[in-house]
Image: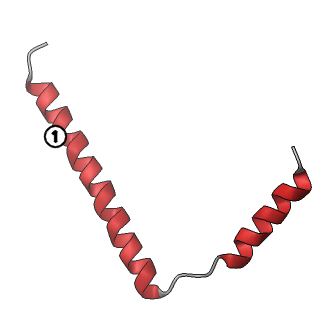
Amino acid sequence: MDVKLDLTSYVRVLKLASTPSWEEFSKISKIAGAGIILVGILGFTMYAIMSFLPA
């Protein structure tokens, strides 16, 4: 495992990274929130169906 090579790779990625604009951040937040809500609704639906089925 070459630690020096790994560190230079990490530094290169950090130099290329930039702070997103407010518009970009807002769009990503809305998409992530919609995904979380969708998974929650799906989980609740599965729970509701399983609780009404006889054991």
Residue 50 point in image, percent of width and height: 16, 26
Query: In the structure shown, which secondary structural element does the residue marked by tag 1 occupy?
Result: helix
Name the residue: 71% across, 69% down: 13
User: Which residue is label 1 attached to?
Assistant: 45
| Relative height, residue 22 to residue 11 (above, below) | below
| Relative height, residue 48 to residue 17 (above, below) | above
Foreground: 39 or 6?
Answer: 6
Quarter the C terminus occupies: top left
Name the residue: 36% across, 77% down: 27
Residue 2 point in image, percent of width and height: 89, 49
Quarter the N terminus occupies: top right
Foreground: 17 or 32?
Answer: 17
In-image side of 20 versus 23 (left or right): right
Name the residue: 40% across, 72% down: 28
Q: Which colouring convention does the figure follow?
A: secondary structure
- Under mark 1, the amino acid is Thr
Name the residue: 45% across, 78% down: 25
| Relative height, residue 16 to residue 33 (above, below) | below
Residue 22 point in image, percent of width and height: 46, 86
Foreground: 54 or 14?
Answer: 14
